[in-house]
Image (cartoon, rainbow, N blue to C red):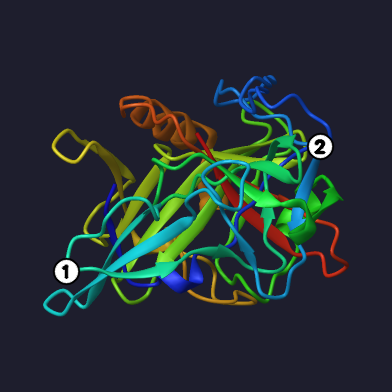
Amino acid sequence: MKRSFTKFLGMVLFLVFGMGKMNAQSNVMSGSSENVLGMKVPKIESFVLVTNEDGADIYKSASADSPWRVIWLEDDEEEGEVQVDVTWSDKKAPSKYTVEKDVEYEGVCLLLLGEEGDFWKVNIYKDYAPNLEVGYIKKADAKVAAFEPLTADMIKAPNNEKLSPTVVKTSGKFSGLVMDIGSDEEWGEEWIDVGVLVNGMIVTPESSQVKLMRDDEVKKLEFVFDKESGGVLLRYPEPMMTDSEGALGTWFDPAKLTDNQIDQMLKVLGKQKKSKGVKCECRIPQGDGSRQTFYLK
């Protein structure tokens, strides 16, 4: 699978779960819990944390002689982007690509699927490489870390690394709903990731994203489903922006959405084709209170 993106090197933090000696055939998506999106949620209890300062190689099977994960890179000068394929080293790269070994860096957490000899079996699904789901890392390169649940207060607390707002509904009809504003200044894009806070982590379906477009000519919010792109667009006027006093920036403010507007947004999102992948965000107890993102399929 090939996907274009400009900030590839910044997209490496995501994780893996585990309880030490789990059955290698365990299904990480078997967990379920009541939530406003009616989605199935993985059960996460602990993680494997990469401890090798040089990073951990990812192998195709539980053997250091097996193929390892590599990145095929191709510069697209016209678009100013990098074309990326992530695959195994036993596949020959087309001549237009350069090839680099792809490792999991120190401090990255991976979802544990089981163990085989001296190797951890881990989930390696990434948003830009969804066709690779399972790999192996040496036990010597990682250790097991405990799960630390997120709470609504943690999510809403000021975060110097993220200035845009995140809203968590803690009561009422939409209790547990998380609306997280994301943006890409380079492309002038802004969106809402719509997920749920369940079992101590934020779980967001890849298909639950609402693109934002400020339009001061509209008198009320307009949720539009674009059949051609399969996406949802929200046009909104200036009063829906964050209030300037005390705000860390100028953003669409999901806290200003009424229950009726949220209900309308979820109904329009329901028209999208459901994705198999989810983005999860939780905490790893490393002493700095940081949160990490990982992807499951």
State whether residue 90 is above or below residue 203.
below
Residue type (three-letter) at the residue carrying disc 1: Lys
First in sequence: mark 1 or mark 2? 2
Tell me the residue at 39%/37% (across/down): 207
From the image, tell me which residue sits under label 2.
45
Q: Residues within 10 Å of mark 2 (few under 14, many from 20)?
A: some
State whether residue 200 is above or below residue 67.
above
Whether the residues at callouts 1 and 2 have beta carbons within 8 Å, the answer is: no
From the image, tell me which residue sits under label 1.
96
Q: Residues within 10 Å of mark 1 (few under 14, many from 20)?
A: few
Q: Residue furthest front?
A: 65
Residue 274, by quadrant, is top left
Q: Locate residue 45, reporting x and y percent.
A: 81, 37
> Which is nearer the eye, 34 or 90?
90
Tell me the residue at 55%/26% (across/down): 37
Q: Locate residue 163, reporting x and y percent.
A: 59, 72
Tell me the residue at 77%/46% (across/down): 47
Q: Locate residue 126, reporting x and y percent.
A: 48, 50
> Which is nearer the eye, 183 or 10?
10
Residue type (three-letter) at the residue carrying disc 2: Glu
State whether residue 79 is above or below residue 89.
below
- On residue 75, the disc is none
- Residue 107 shown left or right of residue 82 in the figure: right
